[in-house]
Each structure stands twice: as C-alpha cells, then as structure tokens.
Amino acid sequence: MTPKFSALKNEGEIIMRQSELFTKTKREAPKDEEAINAQLLIRAGFIDKTMAGVYTYLPLGLRTLKKIENIIREEMNKAGGQEILMPALQPKENWIKTGRWDSMDDLYKVKDTSGREFAIGPTHEEVIFPLLKNTIFSYKDLPVYIYQIQNKFRMELRAKSGLLRGREFLMKDFYSFHTDEKDRDEYYDSMARVYKNIFDILGIGDKTYYTLASGSTFSKYSHEFQTVTEAGEDTIHICNKCKIAINNEIIKENKTCPKCGELNFSQKRAIEVGNIFKLKTKFAEDFGLKFKDKDGAEKFVITGCYGIGLGRLMGAIVETSYDNKGIIWPESVAPYQVHLIEISNLKSKISNFAKKIYNSLQEAGVEVLYDD
C-alpha cells in the first residue's frame, strides 16, 4: 500500500506532497455559507462545515490554527502563565452557586441517564475557582497565573458568520489571582500589552484597537480588542487623536474620549478578537476563595480574566487579508512559507531538482509545501 506521507531525504523529514492531501479545493462554497471567511477557507480546503457554527479543521487549516495557538501559548508562558486543561463537562451545582445556570441563555445543558444535569462549558469560572480553593491559602501563594486552550460550546442562535461566531470554538482563557487591586491592575495593563504583541505577530496589529467596553457586573469598564473589517458585527468609535476606541455602549454614556478628552471619532465595523476583564471578587465570593494576609486577616482573592478566540482570530485574519484569488496569509500563520511546484514533462530531471531545492529550503528552516 502506498503511504499517504512521502519522505524526502532530509534527516528523516517527512512531508506531505500536495497530490497526497486527502482534501481538495472547491470551485464554490456551500450555498448556505454566508461569511466570506468560511467561504474562502472551505474553497481552499482548510475547513469543512459540519453544521451551522461547527467546522472541521482539515490538515492545512489545522496547521494554521496550531500556529496561532503556539504564538498565543508562547506569549502566555512569557507572562508567567501555567497551562492546564479543564473539563468541558461541568457540574450544575457550580453554575447554581454563581447564579448563571438560569441566567445564561446560551448555556448548553445535558442530562445523564439518571437525570443529573451538567453544563457544557462556554467559560470556566465555575471550574477554576473551586480548583484554586484547594491551593490558595496565604498571601504567600499569590499571585498565580493560569491558562488553558480548549474547545468551548455556546448555543448561538445566529451562527452565520463562519469562524467568527461558532457553537463550538477553540478559546484561550487566562486567569490571574492577586492579593489586591493594585497588583491586579498592574498585571492587567501588562496583559493588554501582551495582547497587542500577539496581534502584531499575527499581522492584524495595525487593524486592531484597544476598545473600552462595559464591565458588566464586574467593573465599570472591560476592554476588548477589535479588528476593523466590514464583516464585523460590532461598531466601534476610534479616537482620531490617541487611537483607542470605545464601543456603542460607552459612547452613549460618554461622548468624549476617556483617555484624551477629544470629540473626534471615526466609526468602523469590527470583530472582537480578544477581551480582558477585572473580575474583582465576584467568583471568589461565590466559591469562598480566600487567603490570609500578612496580618492574618482573611480576604477574598482579587481576579482578572483574559480571553482570546483562536478560531475567531483565524476568521478575522481571513476577513482582513484576501483578494479575488483567495486568502493572503501573514507569514507567521501561513501553513507553509513556500509552495514548491513541479510544472515540467521532464519528470525525473525536474523532480530531482525540486527535491534539491526542497532540501536546501528545509536546511534554511523554511517550511515548504511540495506540490508535485
């Protein structure tokens, strides 16, 4: 049987020839696929649509997704994060404690054969806080920085935006735990800079704006990272002086820029590709997550939360970088850096020459897709 992977002699390097990829490009995307990002990714053979809001990542698409994941992981590790993997299946009682079992409309709920109910996690506060209750006891145990990269599930009613709005999607959650708000605020600001660096590496930094948003029940403000594109579902208002943005909720309350006080804004459509929240003590109080300070007094742990959707990022990159011939990937996340193509009838001679080129590029650290 012919193996699906072919080896070129370069220190055991195994490559996939393009002719042996089981996936194929398509002339057209499914008629029910409205989003440009999904249309282009499906036609290029990067993803396949299983159903609305749910996609399979095919070899080339998974390669790009893994590059995005590795960039984010490297930056989270540099920020002191310790990676874990929490369960998607979560106990109902934890969601009852936070009051979100009945209040979160997009929460998937399932029952086992005995009638016991569970949540399929769209977020992980209901898991991380009980976990930390077993490990944080003293101010000496803080700060702690923990993250995971895991599939989430959300009951989206409008799953029509390709990778931008999914029912199942890959996300990075990062949580920071602190003794006081000053320490949390300093870390929060540093994480905003980390996020900016991530988006710069991914090639969308010049289109992505640090955006003030409502803090919901947690704080006065949270912050979103919004990438400008006509495919965006959000509207942001960019200050033409200091280049931060505010969303629709905030501009209704405050007509001037919160940073510089100017009134001159540009209105744009945008995609939210990341967010950061100051959670304060909300979930710590729900689960009794406390520590003893230097004086022996018990206090609730102060928390920050930092999220990035990886699939959404991939979709946002596509929406901001394509032409009439297809997707134009930034080098940092392109599945391969070079596409090596054989286009001659002199098969033996040209093949040998192509292999030499391939090996030279590999030795130089260049990723090559060998199209034979």
Image (cartoon, rainbow, N blue to C red):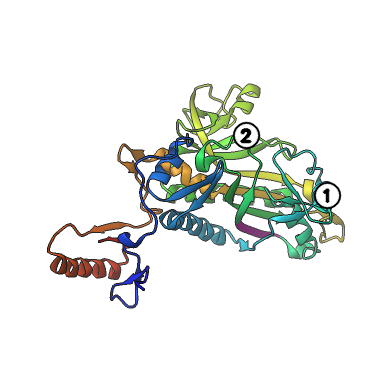
- Residue 286 image point, x, y percent: 83, 49
Which numbered dot is residue 285?
1
- Residue 257 or 156: which is nearer the viewer? 156
- Residue 48 image point, x, y percent: 47, 48
Q: Is residue 195 above or below residue 270?
A: below
- Residue 207 image point, x, y percent: 44, 38
Q: Is residue 80 above or below residue 282?
A: below
Q: Which residue is mark 2?
A: 213
What secondary structure is marked by label 2? strand
* Residue found at the very far bottom of the displayed protein: 11
The part of the chain drawn in magenta is 143-149
Residue at 70%, 52% in the rendered image: 124
- Residue 295 or 94: which is nearer the viewer? 94
Quarter of the view holding residue 107:
top right
Q: Is residue 144 magenta?
A: yes
- Residue 221 or 174: which is nearer the viewer? 174
Categorize mark 2 by other alpha carbons within 10 Å: few (<14), some (14-19), many (20+).
many
What main secondary structure does the magenta stretch of the protein show? Answer: strand
What secondary structure is marked by label 1? helix
The three-letter amino acid code for the residue at tag 2 is: Ala
- Residue 370 image point, x, y percent: 28, 62
